[in-house]
């Protein structure tokens, strides 16, 4: 998926500012985009998916 | 993204098939399609957006043309009437485009599900997308298209001049939506909403986990109590079991003693029997002794019997020489002989002489003589003082008989004596046994046994009761431990949930911050580009530029930097400027397709906008009415930037549109 350079920079800054893994923010937005673009999970699965993503990050 | 070729088959007025190849030349970004009203210009715009986004794009278009009853609202409205008439309902738009140096082949097709389609529901839509030289269709064609240029952002690349004025209002939801859509903010906002929803659930779960912790504490307390009780009851049970074991042992001992009581009774019975037997035997003994003594008393010779035997023996030695006895015997024999001869049946004598009466008379005489002599001899013999041998033998026989009887008595007396002694021994032994046992204790044993039995019953009942309680407590402990284990497992998730919640909270804040920052930064880009475009198309009006307020209202800034509401004459320019700004802020690289973009501008503005078209994009497709090119200098200006010019016309007879390249 392509990404707006401004958004990319903001994600990097937000990751530092809020002490959140940069990739996690990317993954979350990407998942939402995938769903929105009809490429990924349906809405009802997104929460589960987000949770999985979060848990994966916790486990790391 | 650059369009290379557009092919329309039975798409609105384009039938059966019309192909447009877009020209790309350096410094000439424009592809200009002109035609009269109703020739098919908007159909080209619709063909592009429909090819890329399908029916969703048509629905969006319909919303912008609510007042236009002719505006298509769905796929059915797009299908050429001949295709509907022939029953196939077939319609296809193929778009070949280039993106990031790769060629894409997109085919969107509509077919009828029924032999004679009459409504949109009778049609089915299908999209295939192939990338590069690959013959394989992409799995998510729409997703891929959206990634290249999302539908939300596409309206600032493919737009209808009739619709742009909505972005020039003093305050507008459309403006807010437009900014957010083109910046990709809705998906970030949506992501934040989803994260927040998840966070709320996580919080709820944490609450549940806390409840579980409370439950856990309760269960732990209950378990501790249950364990204490279990151990207490188990201890009591074990003590009772030991007590019972001891009691059982005592009972066995007591029962053994009780058995010994039975033995004493038997001994007593035996003793009685022995005593009776002994008494009987004693009486028999006494009788025998008495009889024996009487026998001895009546036979004084008994004591001299051996002496008599001695005399007899001596007498026997001399008995053979006794003449008197011999004579008696001889005479007796003679008498017997005469008696035989005197028998009438005897006719002859032993010497053979016939016996006659004389002989018989003589014989009688002899007999009488012999008998006389015998009598005399017997008288002589009876007068003798010494006993005869017969008498002595008789006495001796008697003595021996008595002696024999005496011996028998003695023998029987001895047997009885022995038996009496034996019985006496047994009686003494039994008496000793009976005497050796503690009779009183033995008597009290039965009471003790009965008491112990009662205690045993009570203990057994208590043990059964305790076993039941211990079982219940054990089962309760197991259940509580199981519940504790499950809750502990659940509680094990608490830390993960808590960590997820913490992360989700931070993530939500980060996304929130990103949206704000994104909006702020992008707004600056939009404002900067919109202002630049506006100043390019309206350089002499003395405005400083365009500003977007926090409430999303768009204002013109006068030379003093004061905001000013755009007048009717500026609304189109402000809207175009805003779209331009959005186009640049979106940072998508896509062609711009503009339909009727100059129509609402005066000739001066038309030229100004036409002059600045090239800044919009590397490829611009202009769909213009003939009248839009009539302003002075516009046509020339556009010609100078046009890679191709085409004329769209429509056959009035069959209603079909055609595209003719004119340059």
Image (spheres, coloured by chain):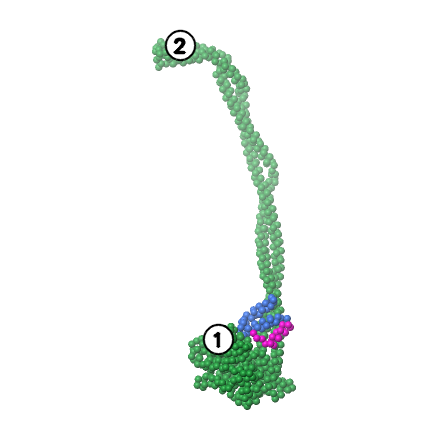
Figure quadrant of residue B1: bottom right
Camera-near label (1 vs 2) is: 1
Q: Provide residue B379's location: percent of width, then percent of height.
A: 46, 11
Characterize the magenta stretch by its predominant secondary structure.
Answer: helix
The label shown at residue B574 is none
Vertical comparison of A38 with B618: above or below: above
Q: Give whichever of discs 1 and 2 has the lower sequence position.
A: 1
Question: Can residue B164 be seen in the rendering of this structure?
Answer: no
Which residue is rendered at x = 61% and y = 38% of the image?
A: B438
Which residue is rendered at x = 61% and y = 89% of the image?
A: B540
Q: Residues within 10 Å of mark 2 (few under 14, many from 20)?
A: some
Question: Can residue B292 be seen in the rendering of this structure?
Answer: yes
How far, Cα to Cα, is label 1 from label 2? Answer: 187 Å
Q: Which chain is blue?
A: A
Q: Provide residue B634's location: percent of width, then percent of height.
A: 55, 88
The residue wearing badge 2 is: B366
Q: Is residue A3 magenta?
A: yes
Chain to which mark 2 belongs: B
Q: Provide residue B529's location: percent of width, then percent of height.
A: 60, 82
Figure quadrant of residue B584: bottom right
The residue wearing badge 1 is: B126
Q: Which chain is green?
A: B
Viewer-proximal residue among B654 and B365? B654
Boundaries of the magenta span: A1-17
Q: Residues within 10 Å of mark 1 (few under 14, many from 20)?
A: few
Q: Is residue B155 magenta?
A: no
- Secondary structure, mark 2, is helix
- Secondary structure, mark 1, is strand
């Amino acid at each position: 998926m392509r990404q707006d350079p401004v958004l990319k920079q903001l994600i990097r800054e937000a990751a530092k500012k809020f002490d959140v893994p940069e990739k996690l923010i990317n993954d979350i937005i990407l998942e939402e985009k995938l769903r929105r673009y009809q490429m990924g999970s349906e809405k009802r699965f997104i929460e589960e998916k987000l949770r999985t993503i979060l848990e994966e990050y916790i486990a790391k | 993204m650059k369009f290379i070729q557009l092919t329309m088959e039975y798409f609105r007025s384009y039938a059966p098939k019309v192909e447009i190849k877009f020209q790309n030349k350096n410094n000439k970004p424009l592809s200009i399609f002109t035609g009269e009203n109703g020739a098919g210009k908007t159909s080209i715009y619709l063909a592009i957006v429909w090819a890329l986004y399908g029916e969703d794009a048509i629905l969006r278009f319909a919303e912008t043309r609510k007042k236009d009853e002719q505006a298509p609202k769905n796929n059915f409205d797009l299908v050429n009437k001949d295709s509907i008439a022939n029953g196939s309902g077939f319609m296809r738009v193929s778009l070949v485009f280039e993106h990031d140096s790769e060629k894409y082949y997109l085919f969107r097709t509509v077919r009828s599900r029924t032999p004679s389609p009459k409504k949109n529901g009778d049609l089915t839509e299908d999209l295939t997308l192939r990338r590069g030289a690959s013959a394989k269709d992409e799995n998510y064609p729409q997703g891929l298209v959206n990634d290249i240029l999302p539908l939300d952002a596409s309206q600032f690349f493919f737009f209808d001049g009739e619709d742009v004025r909505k972005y020039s209002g003093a305050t507008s939801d459309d403006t807010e939506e437009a900014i957010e859509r083109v910046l990709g903010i809705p998906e970030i906002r949506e992501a934040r909403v989803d994260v927040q929803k998840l966070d709320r659930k996580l919080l709820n779960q944490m609450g549940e986990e806390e409840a579980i912790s409370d439950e856990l504490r309760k269960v732990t307390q209950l378990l501790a109590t249950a364990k204490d009780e279990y151990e207490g009851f188990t201890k009591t049970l074990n003590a009772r079991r030991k007590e019972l074991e001891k009691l059982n042992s005592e009972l066995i001992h007591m029962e053994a003693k009780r058995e010994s009581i039975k033995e004493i009774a038997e001994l007593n019975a035996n003793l009685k029997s022995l005593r009776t037997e002994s008494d009987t035997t004693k009486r028999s003994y006494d009788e025998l002794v008495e009889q024996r003594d009487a026998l001895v008393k009546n036979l004084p010779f008994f004591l001299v019997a051996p002496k008599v035997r001695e005399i007899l023996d001596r007498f026997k030695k001399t008995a053979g020489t006794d003449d008197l006895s011999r004579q008696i015997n001889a005479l007796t024999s003679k008498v017997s002989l005469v008696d035989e001869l005197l028998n009438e049946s005897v006719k002859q004598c032993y010497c053979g002489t016939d016996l006659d009466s004389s002989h018989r008379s003589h014989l009688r005489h002899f007999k009488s003589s012999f008998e006389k002599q015998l009598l005399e001899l017997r008288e002589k013999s009876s007068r003798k003082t010494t006993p005869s041998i017969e008498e002595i033998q008789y006495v001796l026989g008697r003595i021996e008989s008595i002696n024999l009887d005496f011996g028998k008595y003695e023998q029987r007396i001895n047997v009885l004596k022995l038996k009496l002694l034996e019985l006496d021994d047994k009686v003494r032994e039994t008496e000793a046994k009976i005497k050796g046992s503690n009779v009183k204790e033995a008597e009290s044993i039965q009471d003790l046994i009965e008491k112990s039995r009662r205690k045993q019953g009570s203990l057994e009942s208590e043990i059964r009761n305790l076993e039941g309680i211990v079982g219940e407590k054990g089962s309760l402990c197991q259940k509580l431990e199981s519940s504790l284990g499950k809750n502990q497992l659940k509680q094990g998730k608490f830390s993960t949930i808590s960590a997820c919640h913490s992360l989700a909270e931070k993530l939500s804040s980060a996304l929130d911050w990103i949206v704000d920052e994104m909006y702020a930064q992008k707004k600056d880009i939009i404002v900067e580009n919109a202002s630049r475009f506006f100043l390019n198309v309206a350089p002499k009006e003395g405005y400083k530029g365009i500003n977007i307020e926090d409430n999303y209202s768009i204002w013109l800034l006068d030379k003093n930097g004061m905001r000013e509401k755009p007048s009717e004459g500026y609304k189109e320019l402000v809207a175009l400027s805003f779209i331009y700004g959005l186009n640049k802020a979106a940072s998508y690289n896509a062609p711009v397709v503009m339909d009727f973009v100059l129509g609402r501008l005066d000739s001066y503005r038309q030229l100004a906008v036409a002059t600045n078209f090239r800044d919009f994009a590397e490829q611009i497709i202009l769909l213009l009415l003939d009248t839009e090119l009539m302003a002075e200098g516009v046509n020339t200006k556009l010609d100078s930037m046009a890679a191709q010019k085409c004329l769209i016309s429509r056959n009035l007879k069959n209603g079909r549109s055609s595209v003719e390249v004119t340059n």
